[in-house]
Image: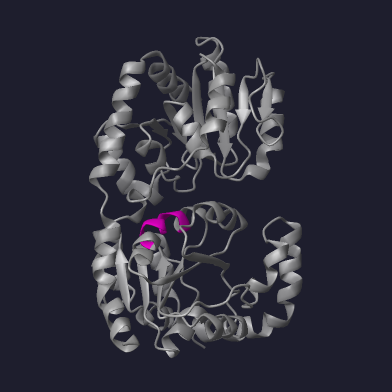
Amino acid sequence: MPLLTLYRLTTMALTPFANSALGWRVKQGKEDPERLPERLGLASLARPQGRLVWLHGASLGETLALIPLIERFIQRGVEVLVTSGTVASAQLLAARLPAGAMHQYLPLDAPKFVARFLDHWRPNVALFAETELWPNIVRALHERHTPLILVNARISQQSAKRWRSAPGAPDGLFGLIDLCLAQNAENAARFLGLGAPRVRIAGNLKFDAAAPPADAAKLAEFNGAAGDRPVWVAASTHEGEEEIVLDAHRDLAARIPRLLTVIAPRHPERGAQIAQAAEARGLRVSLRSREPEPARGADVYIADTIGELGLFFRAAGVVFMGKSLVEGGGQNPIEPAKLGCAVLHGPHVENFAEIYCELNAAKAAARVSDVESLSRAAFYLLSEPAHMRKMGRAGADVVEKLGGASRSIMTAVEPYLAQLAVEES
């Protein structure tokens, strides 16, 4: 039996258990209890009149990268529906979505829920970010003759290999994509190898995203509390990395008096766990969820909140990007680079290899591998502010040079919009 047929039958069989599964996820903090019906395909908003473009990103990074496209569609007078699958993305989009765009949670990928969703919203075109392909949704769009365009498309070599080995999966899934707009030539080749019928290179949308915002009053409060203390940030860290950062802090603090280290974990709910690790090392800790400013004399400030990286990137000149000292593929360095921060990263950055390669080549970023090298690099930059600023300017120049993906994508999508206009007239 082809894999996608088995998948469809399995999701149909599991449909009666959806409420129980969602209830369990609510207890884990992974679902919004007030908006659970959306996950079952039941809309909480009315569909607007006219042409509707549906854009979907899996979670926080993917959905934020779509904002330049969302703005361009709104400027064209097209109604925009944005979906995502995580609570964090929904919370941030509530503050960041431009007027004229609506957000809903993506329905669970079971035929019944997908049909409910599509019956209500009736999108004219669907744009999905990166490799967020749900088989039942892809099939339903195809059956309804709704074009599916993959934007900012990327897929790792390992994932492509797994898909090629799945019986019937490449043609039954990737063959139904109307247009694939890949980030670069390597990704384009992988999508072609998986059976995507039309593939183009359009660049990376994340270079076009605006710098993360910061509340001016909160930034002033933080800077006032920090005073003239040296500040550096470890951003989007994952389990196993905070211990390295904390040990690096102890080494740095012996040479840089009054140093303040800000740790912003990728998953804010881990804040208390990180605080325990810091206290076990004899460090004084403040958590932002409990104290809006670092306490006087705090060594480490844990930013266990959502949507405030823009504040901390503006307050510090040196940023270590996480998920790179542990095997995980790295986190996106574009935001700190866009704000003129010198970027440090570990060796595991394959998810953003092209970006890091450009930053490293421009001497806007530096690789570290352990406590010693992280401490050494941070010490040099904090002790040499002129060099730190030079690295920051180089990073800002790199991300500006690599922008333009949203224009390329809109050019590729233009024929679809033109067709809609003809059908509407």
Can residue 197 be seen here? The reply is no
Tell me if 371 is positioned left or right of 23 in this view. Answer: left
Q: Residue at x 74, y 74 (%)?
A: 19
Q: Residue at x 76, y 66 (%)?
A: 23
> In the image, which residues are magenta?
63-69
**Rendered position, 299 above or below 40:** above
**Rendered position, 106 above or below 397:** below
The quadrant of the rendering that contains the C terminus is: bottom left
- Residue 287 appears in which quarter of the rendering? top right
**Rendered position, 6 above or below 75:** below
Q: Position of residue 380 (x, y in %)?
A: 39, 17
Towards the viewer: 396 or 34: 34
Q: Position of residue 282 (x, y in %)?
A: 69, 18
What colouring method underlies this structural image? one colour
Can residue 194 be seen here? The reply is yes
Q: Position of residue 114 (x, y in %)?
A: 56, 81
Towards the viewer: 73 or 332: 73
Towards the viewer: 390 or 361: 390
Q: Residue at x 30, y 59 (%)?
A: 406
Q: Position of residue 366 (x, y in %)?
A: 35, 30
Residue 66: within the magenta? yes
Tell me if 161 is positioned left or right of 326 in this view. Answer: left
- Residue 195 appears in which quarter of the rendering? bottom left
Q: How many marks?
A: 0
Magenta-drawn stretch, dominant element (helix, strand or loop): helix
Residue 310: within the magenta? no
